[in-house]
Image (cartoon, helix red, strand yellow):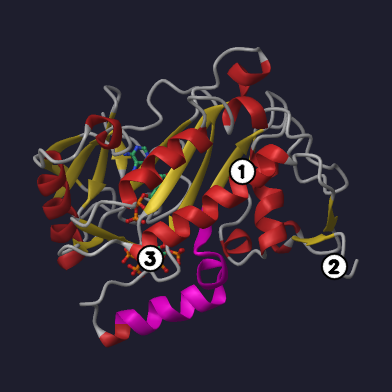
Amino acid sequence: MLKIPPHQVAGHQAGNGKLGPLVDESGRFYKPLQGDERGSNEVKFYESFSSNTKIPEHISKFFPIFYGTQLVEASDGSGLKSHLILHDLVLGRVNPSIVDIKIGSRTWAPESTEEYMQKCLKKDRETSSLPLGFRLSGIQIYGNKESGYWKPERTSIQNLSAEEVKLMLKKFVSSNASTDLDLEPDCAFAATVYGGSTGILSQLLELKAWFEDQTMYHFYSCSILMIFDKEHASEGRNPGAIIKLIDFAHVIEGRGVIDHNFLGGLCSLIKFISEVLTAPNEHTTEVSSKPDHQNFILSDNGAN
Ligand SMILES: O=P(O)(O)O[C@@H]1[C@@H](OP(=O)(O)O)[C@H](OP(=O)(O)O)[C@H](O)[C@H](OP(=O)(O)O)[C@H]1OP(=O)(O)O
Ligand SMILES: Nc1ncnc2c1ncn2[C@@H]1O[C@H](COP(=O)(O)OP(=O)(O)O)[C@@H](O)[C@H]1O
């Protein structure tokens, strides 16, 4: 029995007659192929990547396992449609905190149509993609049994300033992240989620080392998902922090050239995570006069 993924944070979503991904109980994630070249391009990437013997295991582990494609009843009621079958990255997680970070200051591939390029360029300029090299695309932060998840509206997190992004990355690993804007995030789980030999920073650095060399693919508009279990962290257990790359509809061949666009965004993200880790208590101030979906956050030297 297929159902709507309970923990999707970005992208096209199923429900209300819309086309979006589905999951089954055995841990498979079914992503419908978009009818145009985006669908076929993503299949092409997964087929190439999963059979590419030059990809070391310590890098392929950062990508969802690909099980091929299958005709499945689409979520929008349009009948059988081809879907990518992927490993469900949140399988076995009870209350995962998840952030989807779209990497690269530019989200359109060179062969894109003028219309698509203009659409992306506008979004890249209006969000943090251009100034920071990445944008937060969607996020859910688990609080506790009473409060459940904090899932700010997606448009409210895509155009954050550097200080605001840092604050959000702090909230992501805090025990007191919530809509309560007076609370300074305590970064209680920064060391166990971002830090350590198996933490997120270490994984990002491993990925970066590969991107410094690889010239096989250029990953436009691709996201890094960061996932962990806060309940485990607060019980002193391993939070299971992982990074995974997703969304390969706009990947093209690298033709012997370094993917500077992805690498630049990745380096910028690494700097942010490192700073949260090394200075978790550096003070930030939020402005709370706006409705929740419009909240914005200023640094100490901002006008507050
Ligand atoms: O359709 P929309 O307005 O949700 O836009 C999609 C974007 O959602 P967002 O604007 O961030 O809410 C979406 O962005 P996210 O991946 O959700 O950040 C993509 O840019 C998507 O394009 P494509 O399928 O990758 O070519 C975009 O899809 P297309 O409009 O290109 O189909
Ligand atoms: N393999 C997966 N397992 C679990 N969740 C996933 C997986 N792939 C994507 N997601 C979820 O779906 C969202 C959208 O995925 P994405 O591939 O970017 O779709 P789109 O092309 O519609 O933007 C992600 O933000 C994430 O929450």
Which mark's residue is nearer the viewer, 1 or 2? Answer: 1
How busy is the neighbourhood of tag 1: few (under 14 within 10 Å), some, or many (20 plus)? some
Q: Kindly identify which numbered label has been placed on residue 302.
A: 2
Badge 2 amino acid: Gly
Badge 3 amino acid: Asn
Of residues 249 and 256, the one drawn nearer to the viewer in this rendering: 256
Q: Is residue 134 magenta?
A: yes
State how far apart marks 3 and 2 are (Cα): 30 Å
Q: Kindly identify which numbered label has been placed on residue 274.
A: 1
> At which x and y percent is residue 276?
68, 43
Q: Secondary structure at mark 2?
A: loop
Q: Main secondary structure of the magenta part?
A: helix
Q: Which residue is mark 3?
A: 261
How busy is the neighbourhood of tag 2: few (under 14 within 10 Å), some, or many (20 plus)? few
Q: Quadrant of the N terminus?
A: top left
User: Assess mark 3: CB under 8 A from ligand 1?
Assistant: no
State how far apart marks 1 and 2 are (Cα): 23 Å
> At which x and y percent is residue 119?
39, 80
State how far apart marks 1 and 3 are (Cα): 20 Å
User: Which portion, as a residue range, is magenta?
Assistant: 116-137
Depicted 59 relative to depicted 265: above or below: above
